[in-house]
Every structure is written in structure tokens, then in C-alpha cells.
Image (spheres, rainbow, N blue to C red):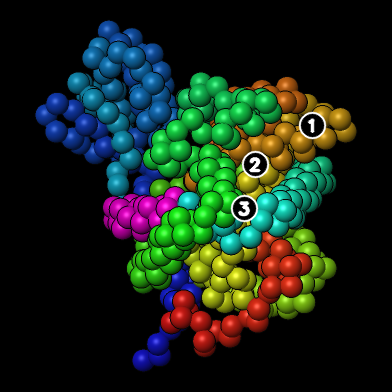
Amino acid sequence: MPKFKLHTKIIIGLVLGAIFGAIFAINPNKLELNTGGGSETVENWQEFFFLKKDSVIKTFAANDQLVIIKSYKALKDKKDVKLKIKLSDGSEKIVENVSSIEKVRTIGVMLKPVGDIFVRLLMMIAVPLVLASLIVGAASLTDLKHIAKIGGKTLGFYALTAVVAISIGLACANLIQPGNKMDAVSKERLMDTYQDEAKTRIDQNVSMNIVDFLVNIVPKNPFKAIADGDFLQIVFFAILTGIFLVQIPSDKAKPVITFFEGLSEAMIVLVEKIMIIAPYAVFTLIAATVAEFGFNILQTLLWYSLTVIIGLTILTFVEYPLLLKAFTKIKVTDFFRAQKQVLAVAFSTSSSAATLPVTMDVCEKRLGVPNKIASFVLPLGTTVNMDGTALYQAVAAMFIAQVYGFDLNLTQQLTIVLTAALAAVGTAPVPGIGLIMLLIVLRSVGVPEEGIALIIGVDRILDMCRTVPNVIADSLACVVIANSEGELGEILPDADYPGTM
């Protein structure tokens, strides 16, 4: 029996997970009603009613599973509400004292905790790895001028890729016009289904004030920033600590630097051990996503989803290869071959932070980037570089504007470029946060915020897609900066890289 390499096992797990999730998908015509006396399952109803004092307060059709669940959750007083269900055989039943209405879970969803443990293990490593790596990286850059030089190159490169990414997104949205292809019935159905979830996000009242943003980068308490996983504050504290460690006597600085070097190396070794379960974790994560969300929602939002995916494809396989060719001598095929493991983890976890340990391992051991550059550029990139998220926000803003009949002029689209770039910097590297930051972009051009209800249904799937260019851009910046400093080594062949075994 052939011994597959790790990245091949992950891809197999991903494919099998999608198939498994499709087979054991949640039935959209089935509901579990939880009452004081237990639970019961109803399925294939023709009509579904909420009654209060025998008066109908809400009526639902046969395919309104999500609307029924969300509407019942939104009811303030459930005690006096009864359910009247007209079944497909013409019979009716009344159910009282219902505490909650849920989807009927399948084995495809029940296996998800295995994947959740994998993601939590990677997230567990991310904060100490960022802290230790940046302190060591900043300390190894010898002087303040060198740090400023590397930092300036890194931020400049990330700014360039972000602006180009947003421009690609706007170009795709203007050419394809996905919002103009949505009919009124689909719009109304999506709004009914996801309006409560949209309201919850809007109520979080996020905003983007540049002065406050800059002030909040400086932590009041670095230990609280570490505990909360606030990556921007951790990066700021770690860089300052690394810079001033080299300003004190070496006999005092060396033990501290050695400690953080040991911690960083221990985290990298831990990553390699955790990656042993990656194929199984990826299988469960993809299976749960497909089982719960399925592919039906993509049909309703086909043009929007296609626009985002086309933009991300151009970003990943056109812009990045051009930049790679322009700034390095690395072959495009060699670069992407080295990223296989990174791509699989990024796609399945939807988290740049969770993928960071794997990205660092690949950049250092496979792409020939020295630790002092990788440990500085990659944690910074995980925090401030979100090209895929920025592109998605541009497309989403244009899509929602088009659905509502807003004709955004050039000035408003340039506002989207600026706001999306700033929002991407402030976006935490965790799943789903891009949707909240999208509110900032919508507010900047006066597009109705409740429009996010139109896209929530496919956000998880597109979140997986947009994480891929996020992490690829980090690796790209790493090799570009290393090459500009004349410190880029040779790419290690597949056979010699331990991470592929």
C-alpha cells in the first residue's frame, strides 16, 4: 500500500469530507421540537403556524426551515406560543410548551468536534508563536534602522497587494454586476431568513476611527492582549520588546532571547506533531460545513459567489505569480507546490492565525527564508494583511449596493478601496470576522447595513476561500523580503521536507 505524503492525505480528507457531508446532509424538511417532556421530530410539513391564544401570528411554507428556527428564537415570550403543523398527508397537529426548534443533526455535523479540537490546538500555538517569533525576529535584526527597513518593506508590500486586491474585486463586481441578477423573490427570502442574524451583527456597532485605531494598537496591559488574542497589540509589544532587548547588556538580554527562541522552536515542533491529525480534522470540518450549509444556498447566490471566487482566483493565480516573478527568481510552480499543506489548512480552518504555525514551518524549512525574517514578516502579515478579505468586502459592498439599486460613483468606489484596506488591517485573523468588518465598508458609502442578511448564507464557504489568498500573500511577502535582503535560500524538494512525510 503506498505511503501518502501529509499534504496528499489532507487533500484526500478534504474531498472525502465534502462527499461524506453531502451524503449525510441535514434534511431541510425536518425539524426537532424540544419540549418539557422531551423532543419530537416533524418532517415534510405543508404549512407551519405560530399560534398565540389560538390566533395565527406567523405562517411558514414547506421550505422555510431556517426561517422557522430563527423566527422562534427571536420570540420574546415563548410560553403562550403553540405550534400548529399541517403535514403532507393533510393531518394537523398542535405542539405546546416548545422550548426550542432545531435542525435534526446528522453524523456529518456530529463529527465536527474533532475538527474544532484541531483548530483550537493551532490557535493555542498562534499567540505564543507570534510573541516569541517577533521578539526573536526583532532582536536579531541588530539595530533600529534594520528593523525599520524590514518593517517598511513588509508594510509597503502588504499595502500594495491589498490595494490591487480591492481593485480586482471592484472590477469584477462592475463587470459581472451580480446584484442586478438577483430577483425580488430571492432577495425577500434571504432577508426573511437571515435578518435576525444580520441585526445581531449590526448591533455590535463596529466603527473605524483611524485615530482610535492607532491608539488601540498600544496595549494598556500586554498580558491582557495576550490573553484576549489581540494580535495587533501583541505585535506592537513583541516588536518593542525585541528592539530594546538588544539595547541592554548582552549578558542580561541573551537569556531572555534564548528563552523565546526555545519557545518559538518548541511551538514549531508542536505544529509538526499536531499536523499528524490534520487529514482527519479536515475531513470532519469540511463534512460538517457541507452537511449543514450544503450547496443549495450557492444556487441562490450563484452570481455573487462566482464574482468573489473569480476575484480570489485572479488575485491568487495572476497577481501573486506576477509579483513573485517581478521580485524573486523562484519558479511559480515551485512556490505553489511548497504551499500545498498551507492551502489545505487555511481552506479547512478559515483562519490565518490557525494556519500561521504551518506557514512559518513551510517558509523556513521549505522555501529557504531565514528565521529572523520569517519570524518578523509572517506574524505581522497574519495581523495586518488580509487581501482575500479586502477583496470580498469590496465585492460584497458592490453586490449589496446593486441589489438595493444604488449606483456607486467613482468617488464612492475609491472610498471602498480606502475603507476596505483599513478594515482589513483591523480584521482579526479568525473565522467570520470579515462579515462584521464589512459593516464599516457599507457605512462608508451609505449602503444599507441590513443588506449583509443577503450574503450571510454563503459567508462560511466564501470565508474558507478568501483565507487562501490571505495566507499565500504572507508567504509571498516573506520570500520577497528575504530576497530583497539577499538572504533567500534554496527551495527544499518535496522528498527532503519533513512536513510532507
SS for callout 1: helix
Dot 1 amino acid type: Thr
Label 3 neighbourhood size at 10 Å, few (<14), some (14-19), many (20+)?
A: many
Q: Is residue 86 left or right of residue 488?
A: left
SS for callout 2: helix
The residue pinned by badge 1 equals: 415
Q: Earlier in the sequence, mark 2 or mark 3?
A: 3
The label shown at residue 424 is 2
The front one of 149 and 415 is 149
- Dominant SS in magenta: helix
x and y percentages locating residue 19 in the rendered image: 43, 65
Q: Image quadrant of residue 312?
A: bottom right
Dot 3 amino acid type: Gly
Residue pictured at 65% horizontal, 82% vertical: 490
x and y percentages locating residue 156 in the rendered image: 76, 51
The residue pinned by badge 3 equals: 381
Residue pictured at 71% horizontal, 63% vertical: 481
Residue pictured at 37% horizontal, 31% vertical: 69
x and y percentages locating residue 496 in the rendered image: 52, 87
Dot 2 amino acid type: Ala
In the rendered structure, does residue 123 fall within the stretch colored magenta?
yes
Region rendered in magenta:
107-128
